[in-house]
Image (cartoon, coloured by chain):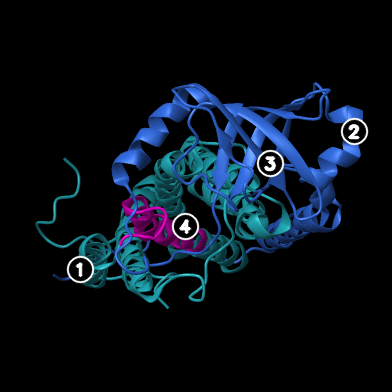
Chain colours: A blue, B cyan
Amino acid sequence: MTDTLRLPTPAPRRSNARRWLAVLAVVVAAAGFGLLTAGGIGENLVYYWGPSDVKKAGDQAIGATIRLGGQVAKGSIRQGGGEGSLLEFSVTDGKAVVPVRSTGVPPQMFREDIGVVVEGTMTKEGVFECRRLMVSHGNEYRAPVDAEAPDMEKLIKSTEGLQQAGD
Amino acid sequence: MILPRLASPNLAFALVALGVLLLLAGSYYGLFVSPQERYMGDVQRIMYVHVPSAWNALLLFTLAMGCALAYLWRGGWGWDAHHEALLEASAVLSFLLCVQGSIWAKPTWGVWWDWDPRLTTTAVMLLALLGILALRSAVDDPEKRATWSAVATIIAFVDVPIVYFSVRWWNSLHQMQSSPETVSAPFIVPLRLNAFGVLALMGGLALLRARVAARRTAKELGPALPPMPAGAALEA
């Protein structure tokens, strides 16, 4: 194939006005980036509170829609039988523990020690009433040891149950 | 350097072919050779397209920003043509990234979407890319289009490092970046094959797309059309 397509002419020449625009754009971009990173947005942008933050907030957390994030405490999962039933567990960050009450079937990934983010509100009794349960997993991906394999049918089922519980 | 000039179609097609081969090999390995992930099972395999999409969306946006800067500094239609092509390639990958992420999120996190910092900044990136492309299609004068969109790209590029660092700066639902230490060896092979596969495929397509952009700009500029080969009818 002979290639005869050439760039259009006349080519835009170097222009000082355009160079100033380049400098200006870079300055604006750098300033924006600097403001975002050094301007304390890190402290002001909070996706979820840890159990310690929720405890510290006290009455402020009651009635307000908040997200609570942390690990599912070992041995804290209690599940009632049947569909759409009660699910209780505790969320911890190693320092504080917040009991959570939820309904429905959690995602298959839900287990002890895994990360969760729950959306809902604190009640006066000090229990977090969960309206939306999300499981967060770490950045580790491991091949199974021995012959263990996840139960795919259960995994698919877990997503169906969540539609009612979560949304 | 290819970007200030137009790449030969042979080179572009060779890259596309290489990309397809790498993607076929990586996808075969990822679907049939790699074992199931310990907790996520088969669902984890979407990582083999999700992560390469993410890397290349960010990389091609970065290259587009380089072209934008070079256009403003040096002039020349080659930079502008590749700026346009790379923006489109990055937009396609960003869109796929969000779709693949949703499909992965539903069975693992339990939700299709949430306004987590990583997801939100990625959505901003996709919207910024679409916005710049909309700006380009709205301006008829080639020089104004090239200049204005280059400025827009440089400013919008601020979001790229924020997307990357979002999982480190803020607590989020999305997990942190993986590294070879956190990923078992049989999962790394398809990840790498597909990462280079997407890069070669989208890179090759972007080089071809830049030729289309250059041809359109030539038409817009009027009578000084580039020389055409005999019998190569362009316009219907």
Point out which mark residue B21 bears.
1
Q: Return the residue at label 2.
A: A58
Which portion, as a residue range, is magenta?
B36-60
Label 2 and label 1: CA atoms lie apart by 58 Å
Q: Return the residue at label 3.
A: A90
Mark whose residue sits in front, 2 or 3: 3
Tell me the residue at 49%/37% (across/down).
B134
Report the side of B61 relative to A101 (left or right). Answer: left
Chain ID of residue with mark 2: A
Residue type highlighted by circle 3: Ser
Chain ID of residue with mark 4: B
Where does the C terminus of chain B fall, quadrant-wise?
A: top left
Considering only order in the chain, which callout, 4 or 1, is on the residue closer to the N terminus?
1
Under tag 4, what secondary structure?
A: helix
Mark whose residue sits in front, 1 or 3: 3
Label 1 and label 3: CA atoms lie apart by 49 Å
Residue B153 placed where, x, y %?
Answer: 59, 52
> Do pointers 1 and 4 mark residues of a single chain?
yes
Under tag 3, what secondary structure?
A: strand
| Contact check, label 1 and label 4, Cβ < 8 Å | no
Considering only order in the chain, which callout, 3 or 2, is on the residue closer to the N terminus?
2
- Residue B36, by quadrant, is bottom left
Report the side of A95 relative to A70 (left or right). Answer: right
Residue type highlighted by circle 1: Leu
**Where A6 falls versus B129 (above or below)?**
below
**Where A151 falls versus A9 (above or below)?**
above
Residue type highlighted by circle 4: Ala
Label 3 and label 4: CA atoms lie apart by 34 Å
